[in-house]
Amino acid sequence: MTGYRLTSGGLIDRSHAVRFSFDGASLAGHAGDTLASALLANDRLLVGRSFKYHRPRGIVTAGPSEPNALVTVGSGARRDPNTRATVAELYDGLVATSQNRWPSLARDIGAVNDLMSRFLSAGFYYKTFMWPAAFWEKVYEPLIRRAAGLGRTKLPRDPDGYEKSWAHCDLLVVGSGPAGLAAALVAARAGLRVILAEQDFVFGGALLGETTRLNGEAPFLFARHAVDELHNSPNVTLLPRTTVFGWYDDNVFGALERVQKHGAAIDAARPVERLWRIVAKHAILATGAEERPLVFGGNDRPGVLMADAARIYANRFGVAVGKSVAVFTNGSSGYRTAADLSAQGIEIAALIDTRTNAPDAAPEGVRLIRGASVVDTKGRQRVRAVVSDRGGFEELIACDAVAMSGGWSPVIHLACQRGGKPVWSEALQAFLAPDAGPGLITAGAAAGRYRLSECFEDGARKASAIAEALGRPAAAFTPPVVGEEVDPSFTALWHVPGAKSKAFVDFQNDVHTGDLGLAVREGFGHVEHAKRYTTSGMATDQGKLGNINAVGILAGMRGVSPAEVGTTTFRPFYTPVSFGALAGTSAGEHAMPVRRSPLHGWAARNGAVFIDAGLWYRPAWFPRAGETAWRESVDREVRTVRESAGLCDVSTLGKIEVFGPDAAEFLNRLYCNPMFRLPVGKARYGLMLREDGMVFDDGTVSRLGEEHFLITTTTAMASGVLAHMEFAAQALWPELRVRFLSVSDQWAQMSIAGPKARTILQALVEDDISSAAFPFLAAREVRLKGNLRARLFRISFSGELAYELAVPAGYGEAVADALMRAGAPHGICAYGVETLNVLRIEKGHVTHAELDGRVTPDDAGLGRMLAGGKPDFIGKRLSTRFGLTAADRAQLVGLRALEADKDIRAGAHLLKDGAKPSTLNDQGWVSSACFSPTVGGPIALAFLKSGRERYGEKIVVWDQLRGVETMAEVCDPVFVDPGNAKLMA
């Protein structure tokens, strides 16, 4: 193949030269080129290497289905791997690099795989790398990981911005070829709100590479006039460089717009890509049809490409794909390609037609070989000749390019993304879109109507029907007069028999006919099994080019129709979408909303160090002058709470109010412990289970009135518990009269803990909160000085005398400031979540570090809370399974370090003293750990097999990740005040 720029023709701007580089070589193209057309014009035919065998690969198509020409565009932090050269718009300064080769594209050491191909057949990875076992981790896995993948991602932070937008329309038209333009014009003239999305940077679709005259003028002029009219219509939105990649529920479509991917200079004020979510009342899929490759020996050699692509490069880009082109076809498309190339002065070495009685006539002066096939190609990094076979007579035909045409397949991916299966058409020998309802219909070539006149008529007719369905009168549209129509017929040929070398079905993944045969022989003949066994139709192109041939070949091998074989499942995305576009503006510190407590300002004024804690930005500790390490601050805060008092922000707890005559019954079923007879003005610790008997969440339930409850959840599970309650109310017990809502953001809540907590709090509360008047687990409304109504709960997470005070969110900071002033004479301090964690570990209280989804109530030492006498509660039945009550289950215990100079860390494993580290010898794990100023050393909460029977045992805490191994003593998980004298004071 010897590519070169034609002296005239094409839609490029020859007055505007564009400089770019490929693998370090400086090259030139023109405005209007794609990277692929510019590479061909510079005779750069070798553009990549195949994935498995590292065979030389050249450009095959002129659109988004390209399997070979995957390159990395850009440099530094703006590197985009796996960019299809066939759709990458050429711009001045573009830097492109080939992929999947080392040390260079021409001399790739990975090509040794091709020599070893007999040992690398389909499924080899399921049968190899089994022996010796020790080699897996040290040899096999590192080699496989190094070889895996196409392209290399960038490591530096992406400097560019991305955006998400919503759009609404009456009609979304996907594709701007003849059917799409006709549909858009009719709908726009009828007054519908229209969005026209085109993946190319120029509207026109197939008309840009067509030569048949429309109304006596070039087809691209018709497209230009149509786009001008649409551009001037206020009810039309044009989205060039936009790929509609997904069809979702409620007729919402996902689309990716490449806003600044076509220039080196990036405007920081604009996104480089925009993700559109388009809500359309109706949509027309006018995505055209994809030409199929022919499966013959040596069909992967650089210089072998689609016949339609050869036409497009000549007619649209003014590029000859070779000086002498052999055309291999099973239908009329090959004749059209031969005619167009010949008209451009390109020599046609031969026109080889598999049919014997085709009605088509070859262009004047072109040699036509009927009833023949190509069985091999010659050359290495570019094609030099083809071997044709007619009735057993082989002939070597010199050429430098091969244009192949194997028929047409409508592009129907979007129409099948919501579960519909393509429907096989015997007449067209192709799969058509299923009936997806009125929300999405196909038109033109996508509907199997390949002639230009049919495309215009079909697009206009279907848009008129949509306009009438929406109550708009049909608009006038006169289809253009089409010059010479081309017969779209072909005779299906799934593969050429008698191939002299590998005949590839999937170019990107090196899947050839022999691989599919092996899959059928080994029991993987189902299309989905064959895909995974051979990797046909996987990776970046998802089989856009080769899947239909794979289906036809499997059908032949199994002796059934392609209809019975079917296709693999179509899913979004149609083409790859960057993670940046999916994230939009939600990146870095904006990855999720910054959620601040009502007491955030109070914490900041008191010098808090903040951390991200789940969805919240919470104070971790409050350093004071002279404290240089976080541990110093935390240890001081712990001692202060134990000896005097501390104030902690607990506003982030989930808070849900429950109302209704059946509220008590609802909560009694929701929690595993009794709630039905909870007295008004009292609180109770509550435990929720999943249906499988595992702990779901814990918290408190307070009865504020006969039909009014307030429940608290853990911070992490606030939304999960609310969803759980919604499901229970709507699906499990819809007969219960109960209503609930989240009030987490409505209340500022603070914990006042420590021996002097009551004295400090009483200075602000008008009501009597003495131990007699307000005992442990009391919960009721109180009045603060200044006549502010608040809610007070006598509950403790620290093991100390403690209260939780809730006030309307807007008063939170003022109340917290007042408490700090009242507590100043008593030595009160503010404390954060790190101190809260130490306090609760010392007291043996659990969080989701312990309640991780694998834990039963008994595992956590809360088995007494299971109210077996209740008629029912969520999780009751499955909580009694033998496996959940076995004596050797891991149970919550405490650990005291026996070596003061060694820490215990969460995540460490537990082993018997002297046992070798192994899964078999694993005795449990550490769930939470800290240094305890109260105990005077490292302590931890852990889960240990039969743990409650092993108090006093010495055990090894093994932490391979951090390289620490220490001895610890198993003990009761309650380290401080096991008799609860402090919190009852």
Image (spheres, rainbow, N blue to C red):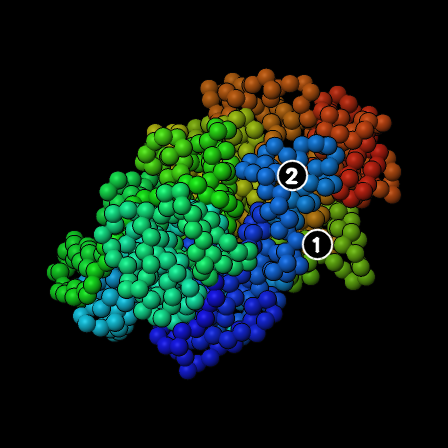
- Say which residue appears at 12% left-offset and 60% top-offset: 473
Residue 286 sits in quarter? bottom left
Residue 779 sits in quarter? top right
Residue 206 placement (x, y as % from top left): 31, 62
Vertical comparison of 233 with 809: above or below: below
| Mark 2 surroundings: few (<14), some (14-19) or many (≥20) residues within 10 A | some
Residue 255 placement (x, y as % from top left): 39, 58
Q: Earlier in the sequence, mark 2 or mark 1?
A: 1
**Residue 621: mark:** 1
Residue 414 placement (x, y as % from top left): 35, 49
Residue 486 placement (x, y as % from top left): 23, 58
Q: Amino acid at mark 2?
A: Ala
Q: The C terminus lies in which quarter of the figure?
A: top right
Residue placed most toward the observer, 79 or 963 = 79
The residue pinned by badge 2 equals 849
Residue 109 in sight from this viewpoint:
yes
| Mark 1 surroundings: few (<14), some (14-19) or many (≥20) residues within 10 A | many
